[in-house]
Amino acid sequence: MPDSPQAQAAGRRPPFSPVISLLTVASVWDGRLNAALKPLGLTTRKYGLLAHVQATPGISFSELARRSQITVQTAHTAVKALAAEGFVEDVMAHAGSASDLRVTEKGTEALAAADEQLAALDRVFGGGVPELTTALRGLHEAPFGENLQEH
């Protein structure tokens, strides 16, 4: 008696998917980066937000959200957490005025340490798969010719 279609499907591997492969690799390295950042009081998301604030002092919440691919509400929540931990401050933090986000000295020190951790991970990754490293260069800014800043 032949196997059922479900039994046959269970024994077959799905076709190769570059998207699934990239997501799997990203998940592994996101975990490694989060583990490296944890002693600094950061996560991958907090690191990215903090880096945006450092690169653009006075950045607005809407611009920070756009650059980080998150909602403005999520940006407010994340910045509130960063401020509570002493990494950023809003020098204009009062009702009715635009925010003026700045990285504190503690935030600057955390970013410097995080940059060192990231550089070490980049060396390991790049040494293991140099072709992929080359292929990925610039994709976070303009994947397939699209500019993320416009979306």
Image: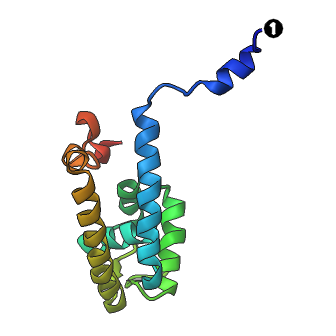
Residue under the point 36% across and 90% down: 106
Give x and y (percent) for residue 129. 26, 51
Q: Is residue 105 left or right of residue 13?
A: left
Residue 97 seen: no
Q: Is residue 60 left or right of residue 24?
A: left
Q: Quadrant of residue 148?
A: top left
Residue 125 seen: yes
Q: Is residue 18 left or right of residue 75?
A: left
User: Please, which residue is most extreme toward the top here?
Assistant: 1
* 60, above or below 39, in the image: above
Q: Quadrant of residue 118?
A: bottom left
84 or 113, which lies in front? 113
* 47, above or below 66, in the image: below
Q: Quadrant of the N terminus?
A: top right
Give x and y (percent) for residue 29. 41, 59
Q: Quadrant of the C terminus?
A: top left
Give x and y (percent) for residue 35. 46, 73
Amino acid on which the number 1 mark rests in the picture: Met
1 or 62, which lies in front? 1
* Residue located beneath label 1 in the image: 1
* 151, above or below 127, in the image: above
63 or 25, which lies in front? 25
Q: Secondary structure at mark 1?
A: loop
User: Please, which residue is most extreme toward the front here?
Assistant: 1
Residue under the point 22% across and 43% down: 135
User: Please, which residue is most extreme toward the right here?
Assistant: 1
Q: Residues within 10 Å of mark 1 (few under 14, many from 20)?
A: few
Residue under the point 29% across and 48% down: 149
* 8, above or below 34, in the image: above
